[in-house]
Image: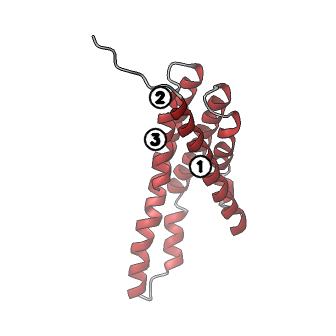
């Protein structure tokens, strides 16, 4: 859940870095889209983290409770699963917009946004794959975010700092 909060904040930093350019406007769109996506995804993860925990604690004391049926009600509620899916799609669109902006701008290596975008575009499909694929997806997302963060860090260090001019 923390990662879904940090991704839009990272995109905001990236957008501010190239503000006022064509890619800068695309990165603002990436930030807004990813923020909306994270906002739609986080309630689902909150229900899983906190709601399922409460259900499991109650089921431990009451053997009459059908734990799996209640968990499925939380996970597969039509509204919950719809907002989750739409949120993941929005995060994928936001990551793709970021990759396009990075490709168009000369600040970062062109390919540095591609693993990030692929990881987020594949977020929803990976839920329907075996554990090995889901683990590989996690590695892809982590590597993509690490590459992007490292490239941004290096680009920020290479830029001259602005000095305040007296009025």
Q: Quadrant of residue 114?
A: top right
Disc 3 target residue: 9
Q: CA distance from mark 2 to mark 3?
A: 11 Å
Residue 105 in percent (x, y) is at: 63, 25
Q: CA distance from mark 3 to mark 1?
A: 15 Å
Vertical position of residue 133 compared to residue 109: above or below: below
Between tags 3 and 1, which lies in front?
A: 1
Disc 1 on helix, strand or loop?
Answer: helix
Residue 67 in percent (x, y) is at: 49, 79
Residue 97 in percent (x, y) is at: 62, 33
Disc 1 target residue: 146
Quadrant placement of the C terminus? top left
Which of the two discs, 2 and 3, labels the residue nearer the N terminus?
Answer: 3
Which of the two discs, 3 and 1, labels the residue nearer the N terminus?
Answer: 3
Disc 2 target residue: 16
Q: Nearer the viewer, residue 52 or 13?
A: 13
């Amino acid at each position: 859940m923390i990662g879904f909060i940090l991704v839009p904040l990272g995109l905001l930093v990236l957008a501010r870095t190239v503000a006022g350019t064509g890619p800068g406007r695309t990165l603002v769109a990436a930030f807004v889209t990813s923020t909306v996506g994270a906002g739609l995804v986080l309630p689902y993860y909150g229900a899983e983290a906190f709601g399922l925990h409460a259900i499991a604690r109650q089921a431990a004391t009451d053997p009459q409770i059908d734990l799996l049926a209640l968990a499925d009600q939380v996970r597969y509620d039509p509204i919950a699963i719809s907002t989750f899916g739409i949120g993941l799609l929005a995060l994928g669109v936001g990551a793709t917009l970021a990759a396009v902006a990075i490709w168009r701008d000369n600040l970062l290596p062109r390919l540095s946004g591609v693993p990030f975008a692929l990881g987020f575009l594949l977020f929803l499909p990976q839920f329907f794959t075996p554990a090995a694929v889901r683990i590989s997806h996690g590695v892809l997302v982590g590597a993509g975010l690490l590459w992007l963060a490292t490239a941004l860090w290096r680009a920020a260090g290479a830029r001259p700092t602005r000095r305040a001019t007296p009025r």
